[in-house]
């Protein structure tokens, strides 16, 4: 019930391409869905987050798509750049906030120059 | 404005020992959360502190304990260390109540248990 399943485990895209990472959850109490970016040796940093009252949120090159009925959400990175190479984690939390996050297992993204 | 700082950055302990990890929250942040990140995995919620009291706990045994001080800094204590406790321990702070505010993570303390 508490799991967040993330795929793919690793992703390689060419510079300028679109990177897509998917997550699925089971706990219907989850109502806050952030994405974090983590570089080696660093802590996770919030990239973008969505609440279930909207189906899509865009910030710059990053877009979250949210499907409440399917209990799925995804991160799209447009015009992917080598500097985007990092590990990406989806997460979910109840209570509409980041109070108690359940993280996915991560996707290692490599953007080739 | 300083971010979340954690100490020590790396440490090695042997099985059965005890360890204390420290965290200074970002300026103005009054809520601190601790997460355990095993190698190649996502972080797992340990617990959260607000107003010096534990305010939510994940699926971790009682040998994981914590403190929050009046200046909002925090400690994570782990007793009777086991090999599986080897991980990166992340501290995150936020402002407002535990039900608001985004999390800002530190760079972590990497614990190796031999």
Image: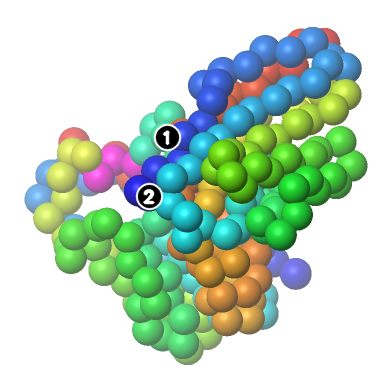
Nearer the observer: mark 2 or 1; the answer is 2
In this view of the protein, which residue sits in the foreground, B85 or B94?
B94
Find the magenta span and give its range: B85-89
Q: Which mark is residue A2?
A: 2
Left or right placement of residue A51 versus residue A107 in this view: right
Q: Let me know if residue B88 is in the magenta part.
A: yes
By secondary structure, the bulk of the magenta-drawn segment is best described as: strand
* Image quadrant where one finds the C terminus of chain B: top left
In this view of the protein, which residue sits in the foreground, B95 or B7?
B95
The residue at the point 41 percent across, 85 percent down is: B52
Tell me if residue A50 comes above or below residue B29 in the rendering. Answer: above
The residue at the point 39 percent across, 77 percent down is: B55
Residue A20 placement (x, y as % from top left): 70, 25
In this view of the protein, which residue sits in the foreground, B7 or B37?
B37
Pointer 1 residue = B41
Question: For the residues marked 2 and 1, what is the alpha-carbon distance in whole angstroms?
Answer: 15 Å
Element assignment for label 1: loop
Tell me if residue A79 comes above or below residue A32 in the rendering. Answer: above
Element assignment for label 2: loop
* Image quadrant where one finds the N terminus of chain B: bottom right
In this view of the protein, which residue sits in the foreground, A66 or B93?
A66
Which chain's residue wears label 2? Answer: A
Q: Do labels 2 and 1 share a chain?
A: no
Q: Which mark is residue B112?
A: none
Tell me if residue B27 comes above or below residue B85 in the rendering. Answer: below
């Amino acid at each position: 019930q508490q799991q967040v399943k993330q795929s793919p485990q690793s992703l390689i895209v060419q510079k300028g391409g679109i990177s897509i990472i998917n997550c699925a959850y089971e706990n219907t109490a989850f109502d806050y869905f952030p994405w974090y970016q983590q570089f080696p040796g660093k802590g996770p940093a919030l990239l973008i987050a969505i609440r279930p009252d909207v189906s899509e949120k865009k910030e710059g090159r990053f877009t979250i798509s949210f499907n409440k009925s399917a209990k799925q959400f995804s991160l799209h990175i447009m015009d992917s750049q080598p500097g985007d190479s990092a590990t990406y984690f989806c997460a979910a939390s109840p209570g509409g906030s980041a109070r108690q996050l359940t993280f996915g297992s991560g996707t290692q993204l490599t953007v080739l120059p | 404005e300083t971010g979340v700082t954690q100490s020590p950055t790396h440490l090695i302990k042997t099985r059965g020992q005890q360890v204390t990890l420290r965290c200074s929250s970002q300026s103005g942040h009054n809520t601190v959360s601790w997460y355990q990140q095993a190698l190649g995995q996502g972080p797992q919620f340990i617990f959260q502190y607000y107003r010096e009291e534990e305010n939510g706990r994940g699926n971790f045994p009682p040998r994981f304990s914590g403190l929050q001080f009046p200046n909002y800094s925090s400690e994570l204590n782990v007793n009777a260390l086991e090999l599986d406790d080897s991980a990166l321990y992340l501290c995150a702070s936020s402002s407002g109540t535990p039900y608001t505010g985004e999390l800002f993570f530190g760079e972590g303390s990497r614990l190796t248990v031999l």
